[in-house]
C-alpha cells in the first residue's frame, strides 16, 4: 500500500497544480480588461486547454484504479480457486 500512497500523493499534487493553473487563467480572464489586456479570449483558451489536461489526468487516474481493481479481483479469484482445490472451502 505504500506504493499506492505515493502514487496518490503524486497524483494529488499534479491535480492541485492543474487546478491552480485553471483558476489563474479564469482570474486573468475576469480581470483582463481592467489590466489593459485586449484579448481575454486567449487566457480563457489556455484555461480550456488546462481543463482538458485535468480531464485527461482524471482519465489516467481512473485507468490506474481500474487496473488495481482487476489485479486485486484476479488475485482473490486465484486464492479462492486454490483453496477450493485443496479442500479448504467446502463443497456446495
Image (cartoon, grey):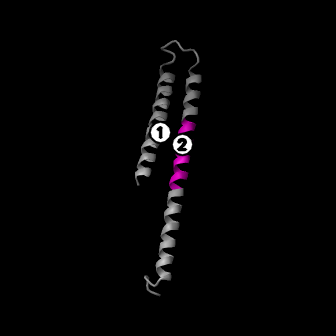
Q: Is residue 24 magenta?
A: no
Q: Nearer the viewer, residue 80 or 34?
A: 80
Considering every residue shown, the one lying at the far top of the view is 36
Examine the rendered structure and indicate whether residue 6 appears above or below residue 24: below
Residue tagged by mark 2? Answer: 57
Examine the rendered structure and indicate whether residue 73 appears above or below residue 89: above
- Residue ID at (58%, 33%): 49
Label 1 vs 2, first from the N-terminus: 1
- Residue ID at (53%, 67%): 74
Percent of width and height locating residue 50: 55, 33
Percent of width and height locating residue 80: 48, 75
Percent of width and height locating residue 53: 56, 37
Secondary element under disc 2, as helix, strand or loop, is helix
Count of numbered circles on the image? 2
Residue tagged by mark 1? Answer: 15
Give neighbour class at mark 2: few <14, some 14-19, many 20+ (Cα, 10 Å).
Answer: some
Q: Nearer the viewer, residue 14 or 38?
A: 14
Mark 1 → mark 2, Cα distance in angstroms: 8 Å
Q: Is residue 53 magenta?
A: yes
Give neighbour class at mark 1: few <14, some 14-19, many 20+ (Cα, 10 Å).
Answer: some
Secondary element under disc 1, as helix, strand or loop, is helix
In contact (CB < 8 Å): disc 1 and disc 2: yes
- Residue ID at (55%, 24%): 43
Position of 5 with respect to 65 (left or right) is left
Amino acid at each position: 500500500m505504500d506504493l499506492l500512497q505515493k502514487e496518490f500523493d503524486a497524483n494529488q499534487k499534479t491535480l492541485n497544480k492543474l487546478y491552480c493553473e485553471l483558476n489563474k487563467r479564469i482570474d486573468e480572464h475576469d480581470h483582463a480588461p481592467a489590466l489593459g489586456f485586449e484579448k481575454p479570449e486567449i487566457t480563457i483558451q489556455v484555461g480550456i486547454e488546462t481543463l482538458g489536461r485535468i480531464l485527461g489526468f482524471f482519465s489516467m487516474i481512473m485507468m490506474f484504479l481500474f487496473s488495481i481493481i482487476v489485479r486485486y479481483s484476479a488475485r482473490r479469484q486465484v486464492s479462492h480457486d486454490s483453496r477450493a482445490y485443496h479442500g479448504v472451502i467446502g463443497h456446495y
